[in-house]
């Protein structure tokens, strides 16, 4: 699994950072950097340039430690960083234990009763007809005696503290932490899914936590998260849970953000918009055939969702995963860029993301970086103002540039924020407004 880590892996990020940090102490800056490059750690765990400068000023970067000192520092740092993670979780061991097959139900308002006890789910455009005792396409909505039930209303299988840049929101509280949440289930069957282990699973087949909405928000506050991100599999299929959590989150001053395939009907989308601060939609391609063949979905409803989000003035960012030979045709990409500009606005941030072989498309190569650069050039020449290259850390396409004066206004190193020149939502150099949520 790439983006969605199992709960037991939640210490991976701080642990690897600490070992890396102390290793740099021990081995010296130059040697560590060359090993970094060789192992690919530079991708997400590079020490920001500001810290390197500080270390250098204090003579730390060139200092040497004994092996004993190195291990002691590792241990102490590990304990210090682990403490908030360990103590932030609920104190009852029962609440902390993930259980296989945990189901938390809630009747859904999004369905129509049909004859013979059947129901039609109205949550997404698939509009599944579900006979008694059966489930819809997404595997998490069931007909119980003529009533539609969500089976994932309080039993997330992933809860993880992440930098919000990882979602990837680049224009929402840069540098802040987000509590990321997911249940199993999805309304699509993407052959290139990064999280297929949970998106294509029944809730009975995954290990889930029992987390009532108010506990989720308490956890977010305790862990210092500024937002809760509903993400990883497909959050619209656990909409009832989102609505419950978000009502508590709003009261606690925590933002609600979603990363979704955008495949949702207008009525539930209106309910979602009522609680949402920002949305990140995967625009997986710009051809109906692509959606049908590779996702078992449809393009038109996704476009409608993005237009509705804009009309509701929800902050919107878009990711397009560029897959070699599947959706990397430059003419179609240009068509997509022009549509985004005309329908959503030139200032809509667009992430052109690199494909890596996975799930059912393991035989395809990764997207060449030159293809992403060409696509970015095309998007900028079509008039889009904020175009990023995703999943190529260290590329200049990870930074934010002011479309008016051309200055770099947010510098990113991996998922960390370096320098930022945005004052009250405007470029600090020329005053041009930058779309997003900045405070
Ligand atoms: S949400 Fe699930 S059950 Fe409802 S229509 Fe979509 S795929 Fe079918």
Image (cartoon, rainbow, N blue to C red):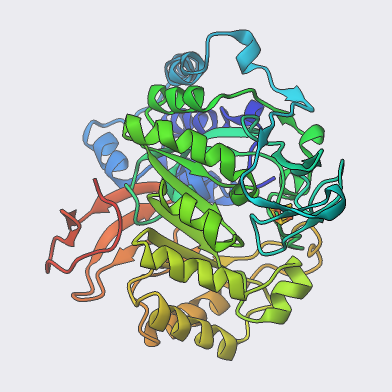
Q: Quadrant of the N terminus?
A: top right
The residue at the point 26 percent across, 32 percent down is 59
Q: Is residue 321 visible?
A: no
**Percent x, y of residue 188:** 72, 60
* Label total for image: 0
Tell me: 243 left or right of 424.
right
Q: Where is the C terminus found, in terms of image quarters? A: top left
Is 322 displayed left or right of 135 in the figure?
left
Reply above or below: 172 against 127: above
Q: Residue at x 19, y 66 (%)?
A: 433
In the displayed structure, 11 sits above or below 126; it is above
Question: Which residue is nearer to you in this view: 115 or 381?
Answer: 115
Residue 426 screen position, x and y as percent = 17, 61
Quarter of the view holding residue 171: bottom left
Q: Is residue 89 left or right of residue 145?
A: left
Quarter of the render that holds ligand 1: bottom right
Mark yes or no: residue 411 visible: yes
Q: Is residue 135 above or below residue 350?
A: above
**Residue 345 % position (x, y):** 35, 76
Using the image, determine if residue 102 lies above or below residue 175: above
The quarter of the displayed image where residue 296 is located: bottom right
**Who's the residue at 59% across and 70% down the image?**
301
Q: In the displayed orientation, state which residue is furthest to the top.
A: 92
The answer to which quarter of the image holds residue 160 is top right
Give me the residue at 57% from left, 91% from top: 331
Q: Residue furthest bottom?
A: 331
């Amino acid at each position: 699994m790439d983006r969605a880590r199992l709960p037991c892996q939640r210490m991976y990020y701080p642990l690897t950072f600490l070992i890396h940090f102390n290793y740099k102490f021990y081995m010296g800056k130059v040697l560590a950097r060359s090993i970094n490059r060789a192992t690919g750690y530079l991708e997400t765990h590079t020490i920001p340039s500001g810290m390197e400068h500080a270390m250098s000023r204090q003579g730390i970067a060139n200092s040497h430690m004994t092996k004993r000192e190195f291990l002691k520092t590792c241990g102490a740092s590990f304990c210090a960083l682990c403490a908030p993670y360990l103590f932030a979780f609920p104190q009852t061991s029962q609440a902390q234990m993930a259980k296989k097959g945990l189901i938390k139900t809630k009747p859904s308002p999004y369905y129509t009763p049909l004859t013979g006890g059947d129901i039609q789910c109205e949550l997404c455009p698939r509009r599944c007809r579900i006979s008694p005792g059966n489930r819809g396409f997404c595997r998490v909505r069931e007909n119980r005696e003529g009533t539609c039930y969500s089976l994932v209303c309080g039993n997330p299988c992933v809860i993880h503290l992440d930098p919000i840049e990882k979602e990837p929101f680049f224009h929402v509280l840069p540098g802040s932490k987000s509590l990321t949440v997911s249940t199993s289930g999805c309304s699509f069957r993407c052959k290139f899914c990064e999280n297929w282990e949970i998106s294509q699973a029944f809730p009975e087949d995954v290990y889930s936590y029992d987390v009532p909405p108010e506990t989720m928000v308490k956890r977010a506050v305790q862990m210092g998260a500024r937002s809760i991100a509903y993400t990883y599999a497909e959050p619209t299929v656990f909409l009832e849970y989102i609505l419950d959590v978000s009502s508590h989150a709003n009261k606690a001053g925590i933002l609600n953000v979603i990363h979704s395939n955008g495949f949702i009907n207008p009525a539930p989308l209106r309910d979602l918009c009522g609680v949402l601060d920002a949305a990140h939609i995967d625009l997986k391609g710009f051809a109906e055939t692509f959606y049908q063949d590779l996702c078992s979905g449809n393009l038109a409803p996704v476009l409608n969702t993005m237009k509705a989000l804009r009309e509701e003035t929800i902050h919107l960012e878009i990711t397009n995963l560029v897959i070699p030979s599947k959706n990397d045709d430059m003419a179609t990409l240009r068509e997509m860029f022009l549509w985004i500009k005309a329908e959503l606005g030139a200032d809509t941030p667009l992430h052109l993301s690199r494909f890596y072989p996975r799930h059912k498309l393991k035989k395809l190569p990764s997207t060449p970086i030159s293809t992403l650069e060409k696509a970015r050039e095309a998007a900028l020449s079509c008039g889009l103002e904020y175009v990023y290259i995703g999943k190529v850390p260290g590329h200049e396409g990870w930074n934010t540039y002011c479309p008016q004066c051309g200055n770099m206004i947010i510098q990113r190193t991996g998922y960390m924020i370096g320098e930022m020149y945005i004052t009250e939502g405007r470029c600090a150099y020329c005053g041009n407004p930058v779309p997003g949520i900045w405070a």
